[in-house]
């Protein structure tokens, strides 16, 4: 896992050479985790909704980089994206957990 993390870090450093852009990128990725952390203090979250939220927050970050739209102003877009997908995921996966509970799985 450390080799994969190092490879991702090297790829990230090659794509983005500005130190401030790297810091904003890291904060963007961390912002995609914050809705899960905050909401989990108040409600029980579905694991699939949490995964969906974090993945879509990171995808939003990479989409900004792909289209060369990553700026300090747009680096916070992963926060609302992750929050929206967390709420949507909670609604989508709500019925599936009830089915699993009834079937004894």
Image (tube, grey):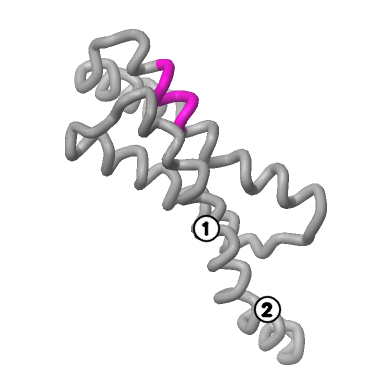
Q: Which residue is mark 2?
A: 97
Q: Earlier in the sequence, mark 2 or mark 1?
A: 1
**Residue 86, position in %: x, y?**
57, 58
Quarter in which the C terminus is drawn: bottom right
Classify mark 2: helix, strand or loop: helix
> Could you say where residue 56 lies in the image, as x and y percent from the top left?
42, 52
Q: Residue furthest top?
A: 19
Q: Is 59 left or right of 66, judged from the image as shown? A: right
In the depicted view, which residue is nearer to us: 6 or 38? Answer: 38
Is 41 or 48 nearer to us in this picture?
41
Q: Residues within 10 Å of mark 1 (few under 14, many from 20)?
A: some
- Image point 45% across, 31% down: which residue? 28
Residue in view at x 51 percent, y 50 percent: 82
Question: Magenta residues?
Answer: 23-28
Tell me the residue that label 1 is attached to.
84
Outermost residue on the front side: it is 73
């Amino acid at each position: 896992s450390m080799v994969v993390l190092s490879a991702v870090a090297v790829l990230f450093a090659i794509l983005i050479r500005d130190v401030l852009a790297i810091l904003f990128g890291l904060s963007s990725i961390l912002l995609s985790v914050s809705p899960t952390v905050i909401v989990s203090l108040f409600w029980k979250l579905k694991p699939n909704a949490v995964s969906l939220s974090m993945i879509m927050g990171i995808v939003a970050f990479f989409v900004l980089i792909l289209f060369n739209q990553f700026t300090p102003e747009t680096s916070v877009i992963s926060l609302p994206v992750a929050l929206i997908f967390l709420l949507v995921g909670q609604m989508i996966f709500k019925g599936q957990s009830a089915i699993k509970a009834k079937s004894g799985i």
